[in-house]
Amino acid sequence: MGFNWKKCSTNRKILMEKPDIVSKRINYLREIKKLRETGHNIIYMDETIDYILREHGHKILRLPPYHADLNPIELIWADLKSYVASKNLKFKLSDVQKLAEKQLKDRKMEK
């Protein structure tokens, strides 16, 4: 996922991001900042319509990989998975589905 373990001076291991992943995140954040400062509209889409957007003069800016904090759907999935994991006692697919549906319904009711 773009991380590796590295031994530090105290011989403990720490989790480090690979430099290319760090670079992608920094470039993404700089580009988003520029677009916001210049008043551009930002639309978050998957890559299936890239060619249509480019044909109409839009710039495509991809989220850096493995960065849930920059991709809101990843935060939702993390919350859902955590809830299901904490409540799943029988490890049956039908229970997982029921728990997921309950959590999504409860979250919808909160809004």
Image (cartoon, helix red, strand yellow):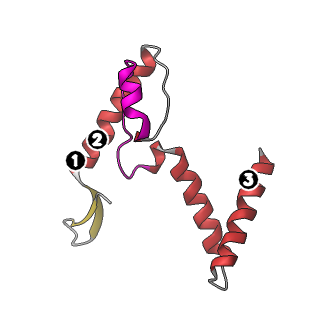
Q: Residue at x 46, y 50 (%)?
A: 68
Question: Dot 3, crowdedness within 10 Å: few (<14), some or many (≥20)?
Answer: few
- From the top left corner, tell me how far across and down residue 17 is, in percent: 28, 55
Residue 24 is marked as 2
Where does the magenta region start and end? 48-67
Residue 68 is marked as none
Q: Which sits in the foreground, 1 or 49?
A: 49
- From the top left corner, tell me how far across and down residue 69 is, in percent: 47, 46
- The residue at which mark 1 appears reads as 20
> Taking 103 as reference, is 52 above or below it?
above
Question: Dot 2, crowdedness within 10 Å: few (<14), some or many (≥20)?
Answer: some
- The residue at which mark 3 appears reads as 107
- Quadrant the N terminus occupies: bottom left
> Taking 69 as reference, is 103 above or below it?
below
- From the top left corner, tell me how far across and down residue 73 is, in percent: 54, 48
Q: Amino acid at mark 3?
A: Arg
Q: Amino acid at mark 1?
A: Asp
The answer to whether marks 1 and 3 mark residues whose Cβ atoms lie closer than 8 Å is no
